C-alpha cells in the first residue's frame, strides 16, 4: 500500500507515528475529503485553488481588453496562445527541474515574480498606457507560472498524500480548478463593471501574494535522495540535461502513457482552444462585461459540478472516464455554437464544462498510475508539453474565425477533434485500460 509522506523532520521528532504520518491507532483517511486530512495538503490545495482563480482571471481580463482594443478574433486568440505556449516550450524541462529541486520553493519563487508584474499591469491599464503587446507578455509570464504549477505543485501533491490518496487529491484539484475557472471569469467581469480593468489586475496581484503566504505554510517533503544514507542526486545543469535525455528515451516506450498523451493533444489542440473566444461569442447576445463574465463562468460552473461528482463517486475505470468525457465535451461545445439565445447557451456551456471535468479530474492520476515515482516529474513535463499543443490550436481557431466566423470555426475544430480522437483510439487504445 502506498504511504502518505510526512516531512522528514516530523518523522524524526515523532518516532511512534506510522510511516503515512498518522498515529498508529488512527484509521486511514477515507471518503470524498480524505486527502484534506493529510498534513499540509489543505494549504497546498487552497493555494492551488486561488492560483486557478488568477489564471482564469488573467485569460478573461486580457481577452476582454484585446477584444476591446482591436475587435479581432485572431488577436484575442493570441492571448491564449501566449498563455499556453510555455507549456509546449518548457514543459519537459520544468519536469526535469521538478525531479531535481525542492518543489515547494520553486513554486514560491515564481509567485514572488508574478506579484510585481500584476501590479505593473494594473498601473499601466489604469493610466491608459497599456498596449496590446503588453497583455500578451503578461499572459506569457502567467503561462510560465502555470508550467511551474503543473510540474511542481501537482507533483508535490503526490509527495504529500501518497499514491493511494492521489486520485482523490486530483479530483479535489480538478474541483478547485473548476471553481477557479468559474470564479476567475465571474470576478473579472464583475470588477471590470464596478471598478474598471486596472483594479482587476491589481486584485490578481493581491491573490498571488495570498498564494505565496499559503505556500509558506506547506512543509517540503524530502526526496529519497535526501534521506540518511541515500545517494545524493546532483542538481547541476548537466544532470538536468541528462534527466531530459533519459526522459525522452524511456517515456515514449510506455504505450499507455503515449495513448494518454494522444488524447490530451486532441483535446487541447481542437477543444480547449475555444476559451479565449467567449468574449467574441458573447457579442451575438449583445451583453456587457458582467454577463460576458457570467457566460464564461458557466463553463466553470459545469466543471465545478462535474468535479464534485467525480469526488463523490471516485470512479474506478479512470481511463474510460477520460475518453468518454473528451467525446462528450466536444459534442456539447458544437451544440453551444448553434444556440442564439443567452440562457440556453449558458446551459450548453454548463454541460460542456461538466464533460470537461471528467477529463481534467483523472488526467494527472492517470499519469501517476502508468509511470514509476522516479520519472513522474518528467512525465508531468511531457503532459505539459502535450497540453502545450493548445496555443497552436488557438492560432488555428483564430485564423479560421477570421475567415468563416467564430461559431463555424469552433464547429470545424471540435468536429475534427471528435473524428481525430476516434481514429487515434483505434490505433492506440491503451489509455482505456488504465485504472
Image (cartoon, rainbow, N blue to C red):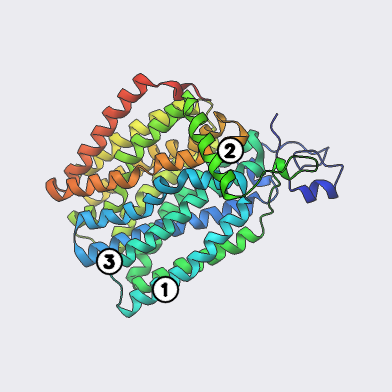
- The disc, 3 or 2, on the residue closer to the chain's N-terminal end is 3
Decide if residue 292 is on the left or right side of residue 412.
right
Q: In x, y percent, where is residue 40?
A: 67, 51
Residue reaching furthest right? 16
Badge 1 marks a residue whose secondary structure is helix
Q: Quadrant of residue 66?
A: bottom left
Q: CA distance from mark 3 to mark 2?
A: 41 Å
Residue designated by label 3? 132
| Foreground label between 1 and 2 | 1
Q: Quadrant of residue 306?
A: top left
Residue designated by label 2? 168
| Foreground label between 3 and 2 | 3
Badge 3 marks a residue whose secondary structure is helix
- The disc, 1 or 2, on the residue closer to the chain's N-terminal end is 1
**Who's the residue at 27% across and 50% down the image?**
343
Decide if residue 215 is on the left or right side of residue 188.
right
**Above or below, 196 relative to 141:** below
What is the count of numbered marks? Answer: 3
Q: In x, y percent, where is residue 137?
A: 36, 62
Residue 120: mark in rendering: 1
Q: CA distance from mark 3 to mark 1?
A: 15 Å
**Who's the residue at 83% across and 42% down the image?**
17
Which of the two residues, 317 or 127, is positioned nearer the viewer here?
Answer: 127
Quadrant location, the N terminus: top right
Q: In x, y percent, where is residue 109?
A: 56, 61
Q: Quadrant of residue 261?
A: top left
**Above or below, 40 relative to 314:** below
Which of the two residues, 169 or 90, is positioned nearer the viewer here?
Answer: 90
Amino acid at each position: 500500500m502506498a504511504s502518505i509522506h510526512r516531512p522528514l523532520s516530523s518523522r524524526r521528532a515523532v518516532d511512534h507515528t506510522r510511516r503515512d504520518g498518522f498515529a498508529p491507532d488512527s484509521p486511514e483517511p477515507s471518503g470524498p475529503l480524505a486527502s484534506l486530512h493529510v498534513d499540509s495538503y489543505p494549504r497546498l490545495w487552497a493555494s492551488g485553488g486561488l492560483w486557478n482563480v488568477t489564471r482564469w482571471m488573467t485569460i478573461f481580463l486580457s481577452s476582454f481588453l484585446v477584444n476591446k482594443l482591436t475587435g479581432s478574433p485572431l488577436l484575442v486568440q493570441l492571448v491564449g496562445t501566449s498563455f499556453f505556449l510555455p507549456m509546449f516550450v518548457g514543459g519537459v524541462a520544468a519536469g526535469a527541474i521538478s525531479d531535481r529541486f525542492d518543489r515547494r520553493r520553486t513554486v514560491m519563487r515564481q509567485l514572488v515574480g508574478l506579484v510585481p508584474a500584476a501590479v505593473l499591469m494594473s498601473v499601466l491599464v489604469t493610466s491608459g498606457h497599456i498596449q496590446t503587446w503588453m497583455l500578451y507578455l503578461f499572459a506569457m509570464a502567467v503561462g510560465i507560472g502555470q508550467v511551474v504549477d503543473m510540474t511542481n505543485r501537482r507533483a508535490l501533491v503526490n509527495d504529500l498524500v501518497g499514491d493511494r490518496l492521489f486520485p482523490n487529491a486530483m479530483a479535489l484539484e480538478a474541483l478547485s480548478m473548476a471553481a477557479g475557472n468559474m470564479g476567475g471569469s465571474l470576478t473579472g467581469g464583475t470588477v471590470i463593471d464596478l471598478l474598471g480593468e486596472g483594479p482587476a489586475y491589481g486584485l490578481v496581484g493581491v491573490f498571488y501574494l495570498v498564494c505565496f503566504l499559503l505556500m509558506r505554510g506547506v512543509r517540503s517533503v524530502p526526496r529519497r535522495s535526501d534521506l540518511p544514507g541515500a545517494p545524493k542526486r546532483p542538481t547541476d545543469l548537466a544532470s538536468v540535461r541528462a534527466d531530459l535525455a533519459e526522459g525522452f528515451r524511456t517515456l515514449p516506450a510506455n504505450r499507455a502513457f503515449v495513448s494518454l498523451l494522444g488524447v490530451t493533444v486532441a483535446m487541447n489542440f481542437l477543444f480547449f482552444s475555444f476559451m479565449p473566444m467567449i468574449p467574441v461569442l458573447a457579442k451575438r447576445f449583445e451583453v456587457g462585461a458582467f454577463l460576458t463574465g457570467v457566460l464564461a463562468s458557466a463553463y466553470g460552473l459545469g466543471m465545478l459540478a462535474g468535479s464534485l461528482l467525480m469526488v463523490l463517486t471516485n470512479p474506478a475505470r479512470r481511463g474510460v472516464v477520460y475518453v468518454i468525457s473528451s467525446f462528450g465535451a466536444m459534442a456539447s461545445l458544437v451544440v453551444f455554437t448553434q444556440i442564439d439565445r443567452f440562457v440556453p447557451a449558458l446551459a450548453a456551456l454548463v454541460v460542456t464544462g461538466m464533460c470537461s471535468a471528467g477529463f481534467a479530474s483523472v488526467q494527472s492520476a492517470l499519469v501517476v498510475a502508468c509511470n514509476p515515482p522516479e520519472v513522474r516529474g518528467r512525465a508531468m513535463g511531457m503532459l505539459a508539453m502535450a497540453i502545450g499543443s493548445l496555443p497552436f490550436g488557438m492560432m488555428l481557431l483564430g485564423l479560421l474565425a477570421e475567415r468563416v466566423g467564430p461559431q463555424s470555426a469552433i464547429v470545424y475544430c471540435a468536429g475534427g477533434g471528435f473524428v481525430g480522437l476516434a481514429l487515434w483510439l483505434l490505433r492506440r487504445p491503451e489509455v482505456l485500460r488504465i485504472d
